[in-house]
Image: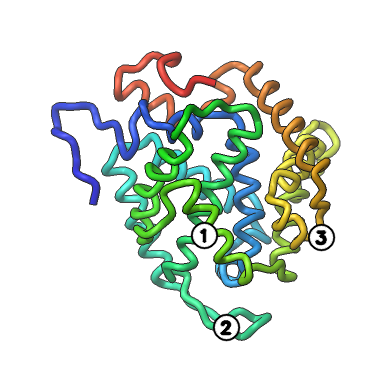
Amino acid sequence: MVPHPAPTEPDPGLFGPDSVTWRVHADPSMALGGLRALLLQATHPLAMAGVAQFSDYRSSPWSRLQRTAQFVAVTTYGTTAEAEALGARIREVHDRYAGVDRHTGVAYRVADPELLRWVHVAEAESFLTTYRRAGGALGPGEADRYYAEMQRAARLVGCPDVPTSEAEVAAYFRKVRPELRVTPDARAAARFLVNPPMPRWVTWATPAKPGWWTLGVTAFALLPRWARRLYAFPGLPTTDVGAALSARTLRTAAFALPRRWREGPSLSAARARLGLDADTDAAA
């Protein structure tokens, strides 16, 4: 458990405003990073089997994105008590579920530390890589610092043993890659993510559909080449260049919006709790 600060002091939460995590997670690139994370996570057959068997993404395609966003927001900007309470609820839910992959017959538990480690690493690496490729700045050693900080979030869901540096993340991916493949369930989930069902009036009367499609295709293109090849998506160097240009364009456009439109209420509440000015953290 993370020690709680003295009651008379404002609680910075798991990370605090001086962390790399605050800066990365406040960035507009997180929308792309979240999509990339879900697409990458789906390449693990057992992780995807759990989503297919126990998730409601088919009937409510936005719910998984919302749950991911809530976890990131609460663990990044909430109080220590709020983060720990959410972690306890997630562990309780995970402990309820076990299943059998219908494609391979392999049994699994949702709370398996190996599966939790995969989900965590794919998420953290996606957030950081997308931030960088979209134009976010990192100083020397800050990528390693980010992974070390994110271990605190992993502990909350029952997975304390995760990579804590770029080198360890790269080694982890090399180790796990032989286990990865894109199952029919993963392809179906990817279609939902890139082209989710929307009300007819939204599709025809707003730019939401093409806008989301642009996000989805860019998130696909931001995947590592080996992951794109698993999806039979182009793994060419030109794809990498185009993805980075698209990510930078989307991030630049987001920064043109009013701050209240591109930053969530959790960050605003954390600033208010700590008495911070909006310009003292999360610099672009």
Three-letter amino acid code at the position of disc 1: Tyr
Q: In the image, which disc is placed on residue 250?
A: none
Q: Earlier in the sequence, mark 1 or mark 2?
A: 2
Report which quarter residue 185 is drawn in.
Answer: bottom right
* Depicted 112 relative to depicted 125: above or below: below
Q: Earlier in the sequence, mark 3 or mark 2?
A: 2
Q: Which residue is mark 2?
A: 106
Question: Looking at the image, which is closer to me, 224 or 284?
Answer: 224
Q: Residues within 10 Å of mark 1 (few under 14, many from 20)?
A: some
Q: Which residue is mark 1?
A: 172
Q: Quadrant of the C terminus?
A: top right
Question: Looking at the image, which is closer to me, 171 or 279?
Answer: 171
Q: At which x and y percent is residue 152?
A: 34, 47
Q: Is residue 226 left or right of residue 154?
A: right
* Colour style of the rendered protein structure: rainbow
Q: Which residue is mark 3?
A: 232
Q: Is residue 210 left or right of residue 129?
A: right
Q: At which x and y percent is residue 251?
A: 66, 26
Asked which secondary structure carries label 1, the reply is helix
Q: At which x and y percent is residue 234?
A: 83, 52
Q: Earlier in the sequence, mark 3 or mark 1?
A: 1
Q: CA distance from mark 1 to mark 2?
A: 22 Å
Three-letter amino acid code at the position of disc 3: Ala
